Image: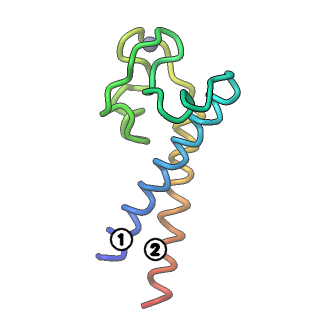
Amino acid sequence: MFNILMSLIIAMVCSCIISFLQLCFYRMKSGFSLVDILFKPSHCEHCQSKINAIFLIPIYGFLISEGSCQYCNESISLKYFIAEVLVFVMAFFYVLNSLYSIS
Ligand SMILES: [Zn+2]
């Protein structure tokens, strides 16, 4: 049970990291300054509204927002969700396998 819980926590952290890296790459590509890349609060690409913290949680945020902005209803690209899910699943099984091989 501990191994599964630990794997879930580490997989969620990895999913948060990949979500942040995707944000950084998007902002670098869009020509943001270094300060804005790292510290500007997340906002909708279309209506520029600040995104509520609950919607920033990887995977869960996309699911509860049904893949669209809560203000302008414009759809959010599925590639962010897919990357977060893939990293979550890979990290979960990698960590779980590692923990079981140690014990
Ligand atoms: Zn919007």
Q: Quadrant of the N terminus?
A: bottom left
32 sits to left or right of 60: right
Q: Residue furthest bottom?
A: 103
Any atom of ligand 1 within 8 Å of the CB at mark 1?
Answer: no
Name the residue rendered at 32%, 26% in the picture. Answer: 52
Image location of residue 81, percent across then percent down: 52, 37
Q: Is residue 70 above or below residue 53?
A: above
Mark 1 nearby-residue class (10 Å; few <14, some 14–19, many ≥20): some
34 sits to left or right of 64: right
Tags 2 and 1 touching, CB below 8 Å: yes
Ligand 1's quadrant: top left
Which amino acid lies under the numbered mark 1 shown in the image of this protein?
A: Ile
Q: Quadrant of the C terminus?
A: bottom left
Instruction: Give the spatial CA distance, label 2 vs label 1.
Output: 6 Å
Q: Is residue 28 above or below residue 102?
A: above
Q: Is residue 39 above or below residue 10?
A: above
Name the residue rendered at 30%, 33% in the picture. Answer: 54
Image location of residue 80, percent across then percent down: 56, 35
Name the residue rendered at 49%, 55% in the picture. Answer: 14
Image location of residue 39, percent across then percent down: 47, 32
Residue identified by numbered label 1? 4
Name the residue rendered at 63%, 29% in the picture. Answer: 26
